[in-house]
Amino acid sequence: MKGRNTGWIRLLLTITLIIGMSSYANAGGKVYKVGLSLAITGPTSDAGNPYAKGVEDYFRFVNDTKLLGEDTIDCTIKDDQYQTDVTKRNFEDFLDQGIVFYLNYSTGSTLALKKDFDEVQIPVLPASFHAGNVEDSKYIFLPIASYSEQAVSLAEYVVKNHKGDKPKAAMFIHPSAFGRGPVSDVEKAVAAGLAMEIVEVVEHGNDLDNTAMLQRLMSKGVQYVICQTIQSPVATMLKDASRLSIIAKTFGENGKITFLGAHYTGGNDLIDLAGNAAENFLWTTSYTITSEPGPGTDAQLELAKKYGRDEKAANSHNYANGIMVAQVTTEVIRRAKEKGLEISRKTLYDELNAMNGDNSYQPPTTVGPVTYSLTDRAGVDSLQIYSVQQGKFRKIGEPITSEYMKKIK
Amino acid sequence: MAANRWLATGNFFITYKEEQRTFLTSLDRLIFSIFLSALFIWPIFFSLSRPYMLVINNILIAVIAVLGLNLVTGFAGLISIGHAAFVGVGAYTVASFSRVLGDSHFLITHMWPLLILAGGTAGAITGAIVGLPSLRLKHLYLAIATLSFQMIFEWVIKFMTFFNQGQTISVGRVTWFTGDIGRNDHYTFWYYVALVLIVLLGFGIRNLFKTRYGRALVAVRDNDRAADAMGMHPGFTKVYAFALSGFFAGVAGAVHAFLYKGAGIESFTLHHSITYLAMAIVGGLGTINGSFWGPAAIEILNLQVEKFSEYAANYLPSAMNLATALRPFTFGLVIVLFLMFEPRGIANWWRIVKSYTKTWPFRY
């Protein structure tokens, strides 16, 4: 009987010791809480899903490789199903958990929560590059050039490379603020002297056929269509254009249409959806992509391999997108730590604003450095133009920056 | 009436007035008073996290909206598939003031009860206009007419620059006698506002059915020709049912705009209209207490499915597709199961529980 009692006491002591040791092991480092709310399921989850994986993997990498020493980043990722009401609930939950940095996703929810971000004074990196996000807001930082800048850059590219009279273009946009945002900026650029004629702005619905629209554009002499939407409507349009044999085989081919698009129109998903019709589609983004290998994409693929991601996620530009925002978050924490500052919303906000000049940050997955200041709210200002050649996006020239955006701001 | 007003085991009415009592027994009144007091008191003693307060507030707002939907669909028998649009009218009424005057204007911050009333009035006017086709249309055709209103509403909001093309129009924080309602008190404050509104509107409906106007709704639903022969005006009754329903929806929308500090089209889509209808069906059409059960059941179900989807996403190989499908699937399944096995909704379970306790320990 006595022996049995001693056994129980030993067992209890062992358990207590193990618990004690494990808490001691964690006591060495601090935990910085970060929150991400995005559409892992529901509308736009094709982009949100790899984005979430990118964020998750990079923070795991930071913790596993002790990039912040003994300190770790605890990023809670919550699915909001692309619903602003749910995003708001998630954000409140994150605040209760004591986050010091917030990663958001959609344009709608970023605009809806703008006031909340200002009230709680938390730095925010959304996946939306809508220029309106940063209007009247101190705490929202765009990861890369805004949709407006992307569309104006594409327009500038058209003007620069078009042969003949003033090019006629149309815009094919998503029926929301996400799609409409850049229209007025492109029009302003035209008013400021960009030699282009915007013939029509088409807001697509859930159309399964764009034949009539494409023929109308052809009859108006449109040679370029600049898209600001998501991949699926672009793929539908490209397939219809291919069937009508109106896709330009070379840039600006006479009597044909050259299609161009901003960040969320392109990527491997577009090629999967549109097939051969995606050939010669021109796409711009600030990210390096795996079909053009380099140190950044190698690191991206290695990270995906390390955490067992499939090929589709590993090669997605939205995976790179997720990695990049996690990298920026980690970098500001690292910088604040290096200065011996306490990690708080304020110090991280200050670090983001100081990320310019010699302090700019070059993530491996972007085509230019990330720069922020009190007046500059777009991270990577450079944009790379890619074109689909034989089923893969290929780089065209060197990264560009918009001239007219500076004029119209 | 029974001699013992606390433990009446049957219906012993000898006058219509007795039958129309709000509470049939003193025990009913006592239980209701305790329950209501508990609803008012618990936030003082328990501090719930903000996300859960937001969920509770969502339920309360949905209760107001579903009370309105129950009036038009449950009591008056007129199917409305555009109820979220009426809620949206209320929200955008507040948002319009905010857009024109600025989100921190005195009218927004101090006169917000008037704006809630204005939201309700705008909902009522819109309801009356949308209700006009009910003079000529019935059943499925009327449902399509209300669906059209939903479509028109969404189109107008999404395309008019005045409404920010559907993106959120900001609404400022409000002020109470105790001062500005800050971030920490925001959800508790709107909990109380919504609760007071529910009590007022709930008793309002209960009392409405003691009047000829309330009874006219049920009479027109059961047989409009008979109601006409009895001296009621079916046309007026239908239009006024829509107006009344629109008022409730407008009030819910206005509170929603203040709670979320803004109005955006995403909260007032067809999906939300279907959700309100599902809440009314699950709760129990044509019952007042069903308007409380339905929103609570659907919101809690949503929350649980959301958690289950997250859990499933971690373990199942095709998890994302499954999780995407799970929510609408569960939602649809619940409605179908209720329609098949309990068309009278949760309110009927409540009725069974009440009748059982009334006759306890006897079974009949």
Image (cartoon, coloured by chain):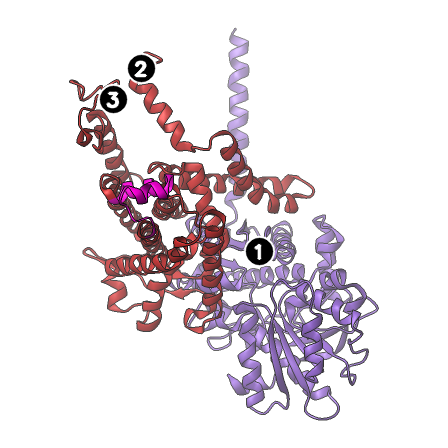
| Amino acid tagged 2 | Trp
Viewer-proximal residue, B99 or A366? B99
Residue A178 screen position, x and y as percent:
55, 68
Closer mark to the observer between disc 2 and disc 1 = 2
Identify the chain drawn in red. B
Pick out the residue farthest to the top: A1
Q: Residue at x 47, y 51 (%)?
A: B143
Please provide percent x and percent y for residue A122.
44, 61
Task: Look at mark 1 in the image and give the residue it sits on.
Answer: A68
User: Would you name the residue on which mark 2 appears?
Assistant: B360
The answer to whether any part of residue B193 appears in the image is yes
Q: Colour of chain A?
A: purple
Numbered badge on residue B11: 3
Name the residue furthest left: B3
Numbered disc 1: secondary structure: loop
Q: Residues within 10 Å of mark 1 (few under 14, many from 20)?
A: many
Residue at left offset 71%, top offset 93%: A165
User: Which stretch is magenta?
Assistant: B213-235
Q: Nearer the viewer, residue A233 or A135?
A: A233
Task: Report if residue B171 is visible in the image.
Answer: no
Circle 1: residue type: Leu
N-terminal of the pair, mark 3 or mark 2, is 3
Furthest toward the right, the residue is A390
Q: Nearer the viewer, residue B138 or A320?
A: B138
Q: Please tell me in which quadrant of the rendered image residue B3 appears.
A: top left
